Image (spheres, rainbow, N blue to C red):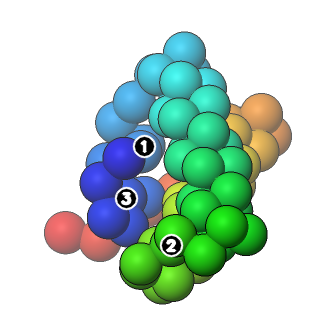
Amino acid sequence: MAAGTKATELRQLGDEELVGKLREAKEELFNLRFQAATGQLENNSRLKVVRKDIARIYTLMRERELGIETVESA
């Protein structure tokens, strides 16, 4: 996953791709937590970025579920 995926990039993805991104992000978060627990983590800020990406994906999925349309600024 890219460093800090933007919401505009995520909005262009389909539902299946979004679920795939979520799965990848959760797997990366697990690996980062494992590295942190064993003292091998070099970039602590990556944990925060991945958590925010997961939250961003969940928010977008919920918006689609509720049928909320967002207006992107040009």
Rendered location of residue 19, percent (x, y): 61, 26
Helix, strand or loop at label 2? It is loop
Q: CA distance from mark 2 to mark 1?
A: 31 Å
Which image quarter is the C terminus in? bottom left
User: Callout 3, which amino acid?
Assistant: Thr
| Residue linked to disc 3 | 5
Instruction: Name the residue: 51% across, 83% down.
Output: 44
* In the foreground, 72 or 42: 42
2 or 3: mark nearer the eye: 2
| Residue linked to disc 1 | 11
The tag on residue 48 is none
Circle count? 3
User: Callout 1, which amino acid?
Assistant: Arg
Q: Quadrant of residue 59?
A: bottom right
Q: Is residue 13 left or right of residue 2?
A: right
Task: First in sequence, mark 2 or 3: give its number.
Answer: 3
User: Callout 2, which amino acid?
Assistant: Leu
Quick check: 14 above or below 38? above
Using a 10 Å C-alpha cutoff, classify the residue at mark 1 as few (fewer than 14 neighbours), some (14 to 19) or many (20 or more).
some
Helix, strand or loop at label 3? It is loop
Instruction: Determine if residue 70 is in view.
Output: yes
3 or 1: mark nearer the eye: 3
* In the foreground, 9 or 3: 3
Helix, strand or loop at label 1? It is helix
Instruction: Name the residue: 36% across, 47% down.
Output: 1
| Residue linked to disc 2 | 41
Residue extending farthest bottom: 45
